[in-house]
Amino acid sequence: QKMSTVPGHTWFQTPDGIEVNVMVKRRPDQISVEVAGTDPSPRIVVRVHAESCAGEAGAGAACTCDSGPATCSYELWGSVVPSSMKVEVLSCKVEIKLAKRQAGEMWPRLEKGAEPPAVVKPKPAKNWDKIEDDEDHDEQGKDAMGFFQHLFAGADDDTRRAMMKSYVESNGTSLSTNWDEVKSKDFSKES
């Protein structure tokens, strides 16, 4: 019975090279890796010399597995220097490092024909130096002032006393509505 599976893989790049991690659980003597094909379509070929191909299904690579050895092939997006290949077989993955033929070139994805990853655009940074220049600042100030006026107008005598004492003695840095807390507190020492 024939079965087709693709081991999961991850990859990352620097301006000078790429690293591909193929998730297969094998001993070093059960794995061989080579760069096959020539520019413009080089491929990384991973051969598993074991009972079956291990790992979870991923996208993009071609891997055929049956009761015998497995071969997984990744058609690379860009050109690499085959002689620069370094392979390390670990207990749960194979790390493949290659130098890019065009140093400084950033690849949009590992493989040709694969779907590009969804791009998450970062939010623009807030310029806190311009916060005072916002046109909404006056409206927000009016809304806040209205809120405090409403709060003060609807408060009892103790709450008004607490608000006035805390605000005046703290030079506008504190506002409390609890007279029991405020009556014996010296806000001028906290500034």
Image (spheres, rainbow, N blue to C red):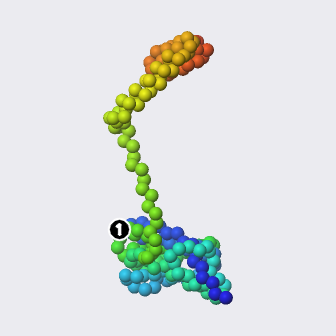
Quadrant the N terminus occupies: bottom right
Q: Can residue 148 be seen?
A: yes
Amino acid type at circle 1 is: Gly
Residue 79, position as x, y percentages in the image:
38, 77
Q: Quadrant of residue 36?
A: bottom left
Q: Is residue 43 left or right of residue 183?
A: left
Mark 1, Cα crowd under 10 Å, few <14 / some 14-19 / many 20+, is: few
Q: Is residue 147 left or right of residue 57?
A: left
Q: Quadrant of residue 98?
A: bottom left
Q: Vertical placement of 131 versus 25: above or below?
A: above
Residue 174, position as x, y percentages in the image:
50, 22
Q: Quadrant of residue 144?
A: top left
Residue 12, position as x, y percentages in the image:
47, 67
Identify which residue is drawn at 37% across, 76% down: 101
Identify which residue is drawn at 49% across, 14% down: 164
Q: Can residue 49 be seen?
A: no
Question: Which residue is disc 1 drawn over?
Answer: 104
Q: Foreground residue, 93 or 143? A: 143
Identify the element where label 1 is drawn: loop
